[in-house]
Image: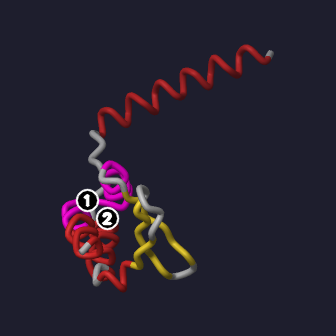
Amino acid sequence: SRKQQVFETVHTILDGASDQRQAEQRLQAAGFELYQRSHTWGIRDMSSGRRYRLRTLGLQLSFDRLLVRAQLAPEPHLDSRAADLLAARAAQVIERFDRDDR
């Protein structure tokens, strides 16, 4: 059935994505759109316009795990030297900006 096809496709995408943004991009490429109505999340089939609630499809747990994975993902590492260079460059730009005001 179409509902089973939607389940399999969306389940694969949700379990393979690292965050919600990535999941939304993959869903869109597959012809689906993630939507939220109040506290209820669902999927809209963009070809037919039909909506499926994640809970009804049995995918709420997969979606919740995706959100947890996104929260637990480490922040991108910023080399302290790079941060120092950025701070120094920002100070130069600000200083030049202040001189132009005089």
Quickly name the residue at label 1: 18
- Give the residue type at disc 1: Ser
Q: Residue at x 46, y 27 (%)?
A: 88
Name the main secondary structure of what is drawn in magenta: helix
Q: Nearer the viewer, residue 84 or 51?
A: 51
Q: Choose top left, top right, bottom left or bottom right for residue 85.
A: top left
Question: Where in the figure is residue 47, as x and y percent of width and height?
Answer: 41, 56
The amino acid beneath tag 2 is Ala
Q: How many numbered tags mark residues here?
A: 2
Q: CA distance from mark 1 to mark 2?
A: 6 Å
Relative vertical location of residue 69 with respect to residue 89 in this rendering, above or below: below
Which percent across, then down, holds residue 21? Answer: 38, 55
User: Could you tell me which residue is drawn at 48 percent across and 67 percent down?
Assistant: 35
Going by the image, does 99 lie left or right of 20?
Answer: right
| The C terminus sits in image quarter | top right
Q: Outermost residue, right direction?
A: 102
The colour style of the image is: secondary structure
Local crowd at mark 2 within 10 Å, few (<14), some, or many (≥20)?
some
| Residue situated in front as seen by the camera: 47 or 52 | 47
The residue where tag 2 is placed is 70
Magenta stretch contains residue 96: no
Tell me the residue at 46%/33% (across/down). Answer: 87
Query: Is 8 in front, or is 16?
Result: 8
Q: Considering the numbered disc 1 on the image, is that residue within a helix, a strand or a loop?
A: loop
Left or right of 70? Residue 93 is right
Residue 37 percent location from the top left of the image: 55, 76
Determine whether label 1 and label 2 are within 8 Å by CB. Answer: yes
